Image: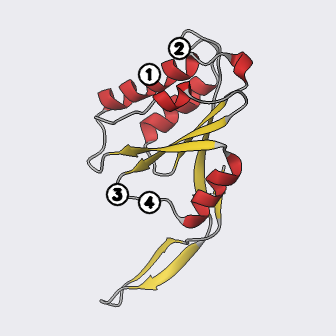
Amino acid sequence: MIDLVLETLETLEKGTNFAMVFINEQHSLMDEQVELLNKEFDVWEVVSIPATGLTLAEQKDVVARVGQRIGKIDPETGIDVTIVFASPVPFMLKEFSINSRQDGVFGMDYLYDVRVFHNDKREKKELPNGKIIFTVAKTGWQLV
């Protein structure tokens, strides 16, 4: 099961721009991604997704727990929450996106944003066996 450190949400000061960054535990954020997060958010934290993945039931649980906790934030505090995906988790991406735009979906009216890292650049690499592959470049990242 995924470890959610939702206590961070309870310690945020008024007007804080906060992000929860979901990433596979075998992946790491590239320097440019970290720079983007630091530029866009006052506070952000990484939520590691197990390398083995999450069952559908576990993903539903994560979405519900995060949504319920975000819903407890008083809109008067001006705290903005963004869910960021650095690694793809399609079901959670879908659910967070749908729920972020529906007032009262978790029993409250708070809305949050959902964003993903995107990079148009690919780097050509030749493997020792001569095979050519393309990998995502280390630069050129956008938070969309």
Secondary element at tag 4: loop
Contact, CB < 8 Å: mark 4 with mark 1? no
| Disc 2 crowd, CA 10 A, few/some/many (<14, 14-19, 20+) | some
The one nearer the camera, 25 or 126, is 25
Secondary element at tag 1: helix
User: Label 4, label 3: how many angstroms apart (C-alpha)?
Assistant: 7 Å
Identity, as a three-letter code, of the amino acid under mark 4: Ser
Figure disc tally: 4
- The image position of residue 85, as x and y in percent, is 52, 46
Contact, CB < 8 Å: mark 3 with mark 2? no
Q: Relative to residue 107, is residue 61 depicted above or below? A: below
Q: Quadrant of the N terminus?
A: top left
Q: Is residue 104 left or right of residue 93?
A: right
Disc 2: which residue: 106
Indicate which disc, 2 or 1, sits on the residue closer to the N terminus: 1
User: Label 3, label 1: how many angstroms apart (C-alpha)?
Assistant: 24 Å
Contact, CB < 8 Å: mark 2 with mark 1? yes
Disc 4: which residue: 28
Name the residue rendered at 65%, 56% in the picture: 36
| Disc 4 crowd, CA 10 A, few/some/many (<14, 14-19, 20+) | some
Task: Report which quarter residue 130 is drawn in.
Answer: bottom left
Residue 26: which disc?
Answer: 3
Indicate which disc, 2 or 4, sits on the residue closer to the N terminus: 4
Disc 1: which residue: 64
Contact, CB < 8 Å: mark 4 with mark 3? no
Indicate which disc, 4 or 1, sits on the residue closer to the N terminus: 4
- The image position of residue 49, as x and y in percent, is 36, 44
Name the residue rendered at 58%, 40% in the picture: 19
Q: Relative to residue 72, is residue 138 depicted above or below? A: below
- The image position of residue 45, as x and y in percent, is 51, 43
Identity, as a three-letter code, of the amino acid under mark 3: Gln
Q: Relative to residue 118, is residue 74 depicted above or below? A: above
